[in-house]
Amino acid sequence: MTESPERRPGGKATAGHVPQAVAELPHQVRDELAHRLRRKGSPFTREDVQVVEEPMLKRAVSASALGNCMEWFDFGVYSYLAATIGEVFYPNASDAAQLLASFATFAAAFVVRPLGGLFFGPLGDKLGRQKVLAATMILMAFGTFLIGFIPSYATIGIAAPILLLLARMLQGFSTGGEYGGATTFIAEFSPDRRRGFLGSWLDFGTFVGYALGSVLVTGLNLALSDSQMLAWGWRIPFLIAGPLGLIGLYMRLKLEESPAFQQQLDEHEHAVAEREAERHEFRTILRRHWEPLLICVGLVLLYNVTNYMVTGYLPTYQTEVLGREGTTADVLVLAGMVWVVLLITFIGRLSDHVGRRPVYRWAAVGQIVLAVPAFMLLRSDGWLLPALGVLILATLLAGFAAPSAATLPALFPTSVRYAAMGIGFNFSVAAFGGTTPLVTESLVSATGNNLVPGCYLIVSGLIGLLAVRFMPETAGVPLHGSQPMVSTEQEAKELISTSRDLRDMQEAQGVSRR
């Protein structure tokens, strides 16, 4: 039970007694506030606390989530159409070679993602998050829209797969600036106590986009014959991306700059940050922030190997490896995506209360224990046991996805956050996430063992668990380089009052030591 604070004359707490408001703070929040108060030398004032207006916060979350929704609409479409795209663009190859070529083109987009991160990240730290996110939206929509117009191999020969590859690389380049910027933007807009919940809406958009893409492709497969799908039906989902992109662009152009970036401008640090970014930001990030960068790579690997296993490979695994009927496979994966959508914001809110590390840890342990059993269930006849296997994998995926948008940006300070996210996130996705369908399919083909995907997930779980071991707990903690963020004026008053109690304790402890 917390002991009531005794007060010295003048209302200050005596050494050895902890005020209730301070005692109720999570230890990581208390440590961060104490550090800031020691540096400041006085309690917080109203100017030291940022109150986020709810309408502005909703617009920021909605516009960021819509961009992710559009990006993953395309990924959902491509994953479900992998076999069809292989026939359209690589007709002379065997079925297995068509599939591998289609996945290789899928993976090619991830090769250029780090280049996009290196290009857009420093721009986001110099020019602002909102402007760069508007630019990535334009490029992403254009690249997806372009795929719908590429002639088939039968029409223009080898130029067809080359054009497909170039369009995918344009998508990958723009996406290199998208997720890192969107997570940064939402994190810098979110009140500290709600960052996990609000950040989870970004990946909510991710899986809604994937589900919409899969619903559309499933509907087309049911409505059209195989010959119609090969001739023109496969183009329809890509052409829809154009109007979606214009809607997303309109929403992003209406956004204001994030409070953290605006604070940096107001404190006249922008010119210094710009010169630093122009000269050697990449080198600075590697030298000064290599530890959080490695943690970022490990957490992104944990999330995205599972992500692309479920979203990028599982539809094809069921049809091509297990021989399951296409519609059944599509519906099973779609059910998994709907389950992720239902879970993700609840897990995001949970991470605000119990912390990010416990959520990651239990999901990683769950993956190590349950990955192979889940794929054993997928091999079963009927639909009930395979559906259970998909739901297990989807639950693990939700556990990784929900805290990511809140956790990753909190690893880096405001001045390099966008660029550092662009480097760490995109390198890990390019090296490990986007290659998952290609590598897994190759291993299954080489070994003939259809439980290999489960073993692959176990390895990613072990690596992720190591990253969780070293990551700092950031739930409720103000971002590095940002003011404490709250939702209401009442919360601001409570934080200022708590800062007085905490500062009184620091002074009392100083007197006690003297």
Image (tube, helix red, strand yellow):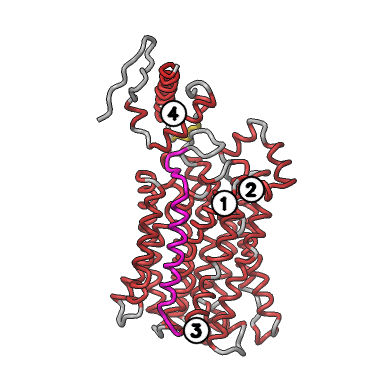
Location of residue 211 (image quadrant): bottom left
User: Residue at label 4?
Assistant: 492
Which x, y percent locates residue 264? 62, 35
Q: Nearer the viewer, residue 266 or 287?
A: 287
Q: Nearer the viewer, residue 230 or 412?
A: 412
Q: Nearer the viewer, residue 145 or 186?
A: 186
The three-letter amino acid code for the residue at tag 3 is Ser
Mark 4: few, some, or many residues within 10 Å (few <14, many ≥20)? Answer: many
Q: Residue at x 54, y 26 (%)?
A: 39
Q: Earlier in the sequence, mark 1 or mark 4?
A: 1
Mark identifier at residue 293? 1
User: Residue at label 3?
Assistant: 445
Label 2 with label 1: CB-CB less than 8 Å: yes
The three-letter amino acid code for the residue at tag 4 is Ala
The three-letter amino acid code for the residue at tag 2 is Ile
Which x, y percent locates residue 66? 51, 55
Which x, y percent locates residue 485? 48, 35
Residue at mark 3 to residue at mark 1: CA–CA distance: 34 Å
The three-letter amino acid code for the residue at tag 1 is Leu
- Regarding residue 251, the answer to whether it shows in the image is no
